[in-house]
Image (cartoon, rainbow, N blue to C red):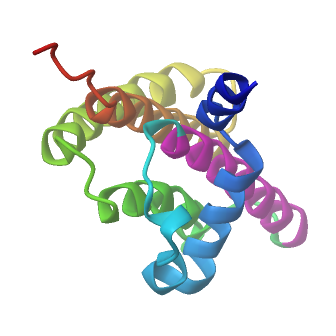
Amino acid sequence: MAEEKGHEADKPDFIGMIEELLSFWMFGSVGSTSEHNLRYHPAKLVIWTLVAIAVAAAVSWVKLALFGEPRAGWATTLLPLLLPLTGAVAHRPPRYVAALAWGLAAGVVTALLIGIDMGTTLSSFWAGFAGVCAGFLVCSVVFAAVTWPRPEPPE
């Protein structure tokens, strides 16, 4: 029975991850000082990025509905996409510098390729939005893969 509880503790808590992201957004690193929030796990970054994409999409949709076609200043709707990666880097997981370099490189390439490909079927705003979101998602997956905890070698 105790073994089952230990196994359940290893499962990711998706609601907790979303709450931690919102706490980081609202209060910065000050709100992330509890022992629970100091534990970084790479899966959090991917969940945080998906939540940020949903928030950015909702804000963009509302701005389009209220103000029409985008003009100057629309990059501000993409600001939530920066916060998950900022939170992950703030935790300084192992190999975070290499993870950031590889993640950004993969994200930029993905954003360009998706943005160019989607530009033929969507409006320029949504094509760019899809490209940027895909880039941030790939960046978070690569960052998570590089910082994923490695098993200790047997002695």
Where residue 2 sits, quadrant-wise, is top right
Q: Which residues are magenta?
A: 44-66
Outermost residue on the top side: it is 154
Q: Main secondary structure of the magenta part?
A: helix
Instruction: Locate residue 110 relative to residue 68 in the image: left or right.
Output: left
Residue 61's place in the image compared with 74, above or below, is: above
Outermost residue on the front side: it is 1
Q: Residue at x 49, y 24 (%)?
A: 114
Does the stretch in magenta take in 88?
no
Outermost residue on the right side: it is 65
Judging depth in this view, the residue of 36 and 148 nearest the camera is 36
Residue 2's place in the image compared with 74, above or below, is: above
Q: Residue at x 62, y 63 (%)?
A: 20
Q: How many marks?
A: 0
For the C terminus, the image quarter is: top left
Q: Residue at x 65, y 48 (%)?
A: 53
Judging depth in this view, the residue of 59 and 25 nearest the camera is 25
Does the stretch in magenta take in 49?
yes
Residue 27's place in the image compared with 142, above or below, is: below
For the N terminus, the image quarter is: top right
Q: Position of residue 101 (x, y in %)?
A: 17, 41
Q: Position of residue 45 (x, y in %)?
A: 49, 45
Instruction: Locate residue 151 relative to residue 74 in the image: left or right.
Output: left
Judging depth in this view, the residue of 117 and 37 nearest the camera is 37
Instruction: Locate residue 121 relative to residue 63 in the image: left or right.
Output: left
Q: Position of residue 43 (x, y in %)?
A: 52, 36
Residue 143's place in the image compared with 153, above or below, is: below
Q: Residue at x 62, y 32 (%)?
A: 6
